[in-house]
Amino acid sequence: MNRRRTDARSGSRLHAATLAALLAAGIPATACAEADGGDPGAVLDLVTAGQFHAAEARIDAALAQPNLPAPTRRAFEFQHERMARMRYDFSLDAGQVESKLREKIPDLTDADFARWEARGLFEFMLIDGERRYFKRSPSNLFRLSEEARARGKGLAATADSGLPTEVNDRYLDFDRQTIAQALATGRSGVLPQRVRVTQKLTVDADAVPAGKTVRAWIPYPRAIAGRQENIRFVASEPSRHRIAPESALQRTAYLEAKAQVGKPTVFSATYEVTLHAQYHAIDADKVTLAKITPELAPYVAERAPHIVFSEPLRVFSRQVVGAETNPHRIAQKIFAAVDEIPWAGAREYSTIANLSDYTLHAGHGDCGEQTLLLIALMRLNGIPARWQSGWTFTDGDYENIHDWAEIYLAPHGWIPVDVTYGRLDSGDPALKWFYLGGLDNFRIAFNDDFAQEFVPPKRHFRSDTVDSQRGEVEWDGGNLYYDKWNYDFSWKILPSKKN
C-alpha cells in the first residue's frame, strides 16, 4: 500500500510547528507549500499551552488578512475549532473531580486528592490561567493508582489492557486455540468465522435544520488477505450508498439524508465478513534486517505531526533498546516498554498536537496513543511499522473501538502487533508474546493508515482527524461533533457452513 508522504520541499520551507498545524487541520502535505500569510504553527503552540486568549487574537488577525491562502486559512480555523474541543474535554474543575471520586471513594480526603494530584494522576490544563481537568480524569485515576483501585467501591474488574477481566480471560482461551491450530496446520491464518455487522449513526433531532442534507461516513472493512475476506454488503439506511474503493486506506460507506423537524436522522450499514485469527511463530535467530525498498521506505520515515524522531524519543529508545541489533529482539524490547505504559481513557485525538510525544510524556495512553508511540519507536530503529484500527468484539456482549499496528520482520513480512493487549499473563512464551505476531479473530479493520482522506472527501473538519471508527457527520453548515450524534455497533457470529 502507498502512503502519503510529507513533501520534502514544503517541509524545508516551513517551520516544523507550522507544518504540524497544517497537517493537523487535514491539509494534504502536497498542499502545504502553498501556505503563507501567517504562522499557524505559533498558534498551534499557544493552543497546546492553553493560552487561548492570545491564540484567538492571532487567529482573528490572520483571518482578517486579504488573499490569505486557503491552506493557511483552514489551519487557523482548525485551531479555533481545536480550542472548543479542548474546552469540551477539559470540562471539570477541582470540586467536580472530587465529587466524582467520592462516588467511588466515600472517605476521600483533601490530603488524598493533593497527594494524587502531586503525582500527576489527574490530567489537567491551565486554560488562560484557570485549572481545568480532563472529564475522564476521575475514572482514569483507578487505572493509574493501585491505592485508588484498592479503596474504590463498585469498580469493574479490568485487565492492564483496559479490557474487562472476564473478556481478557476469554481472549486468552481464544489465543491458545489460535496458537495450537496454527502450529498444527502450518498456516498463519486460522479459525475463520463469519460475522454480520450493523453499524449505526444517529444524529440528534434538530441538530441540522429541517430540509438540509446530512452527510455521513460509516467505517467499512478493508480486504486483508488471510485475515479479513469475502466482504459482502447487505443493506444500508438510507438504501442509496457509496462504498469507498479498496484503495481507500480509511474505508467508509457514504450516505446522505434530509433532516426532519423533531426527528433524529439515522444512518446504518450492514455487511458480512470472514475473519481469521493470526499467529506467526518467530525464531529470533532467523530474523534478518529488512532491506528497505521503496515500498517499505515510508514505514521507517517520520510523519509529522504524530511520528517525529524528537530528542526525547531518541533518548527513550536508547534506554529501551540498548546495544541490541536483532530486529525481533528490538521489537520485543519496544513492545515490552510500551506495554509498561498504563492504559487510560484518552482525550480526543484531534486536540493533541503529537500523539506519540504526548504518550511518552503523559506516561499513560489508550490503544491509539500507545500504538503511535510503538510505531514511532519501531521506525526510529529501522523496523517498518504501520497503523491499523477498527472494532473489537467477543462471542458475548463486549465491543469497543480499537487500534493496533503491523511491523515488517524479514523473512516473515508484515505481522500484527497489539501492544495494548500486550504481554499475556502466561508462563508459555508463545502465549505471553502472542500479540507480537498474533491476532485474535474478534476484530474488524477499517483502516490501514491514520489521517487519510475519505472517499468522497469531507468538506469540513473531521471530528477525529487521526482515526476512523465511530463515523463522521456534516452538513453545509459545518461538521457535527460528537455532542450532536451517537454511534452503535452490533454483530452476530454466523453458523459455520459444514461441507
Image: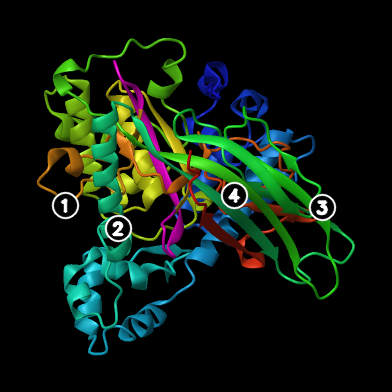
State which tag comes first along the sequence, 1 or 2.
Answer: 2
Determine the residue positioned at 46% across, 57% down.
400
Q: Which residue is mark 4?
A: 79
Local SS, label 4: helix
Q: Which residue is mark 1?
A: 425
The answer for how far apart the CA atoms under marks 4 and 1 are is: 43 Å
Determine the residue positioned at 83% across, 63% down.
259
Local SS, label 2: helix
Give the main secondary structure of the magenta stretch. Answer: strand
Determine the residue positioned at 72% across, 58% down.
267
Quick one: 15 or 244, which is closer to the camera? 244
Determine the residue positioned at 66% across, 26% down.
31
The amino acid sitting under disc 2 is Arg
Q: Residue furthest toward the bottom? A: 107
Report x, y in % for residue 362: 31, 53
The answer for how far apart the CA atoms under marks 3 and 2 are is: 45 Å
The amino acid sitting under disc 4 is Gln
State which tag comes first along the sequence, 4 or 1.
Answer: 4
Report x, y in % for residue 175: 28, 46
Q: Which residues are magenta?
A: 393-414
Quick one: 222 or 18, which is closer to the camera? 222
The amino acid sitting under disc 3 is Asp
The 10 Å Cα crowd at callout 3, few under 14, some 14 to 19, many 20 or more, is few
Q: Residue furthest toward the right? A: 211
Quick one: 387 or 79, which is closer to the camera? 387
Point out the frontmost of discs 3 and 1: 1
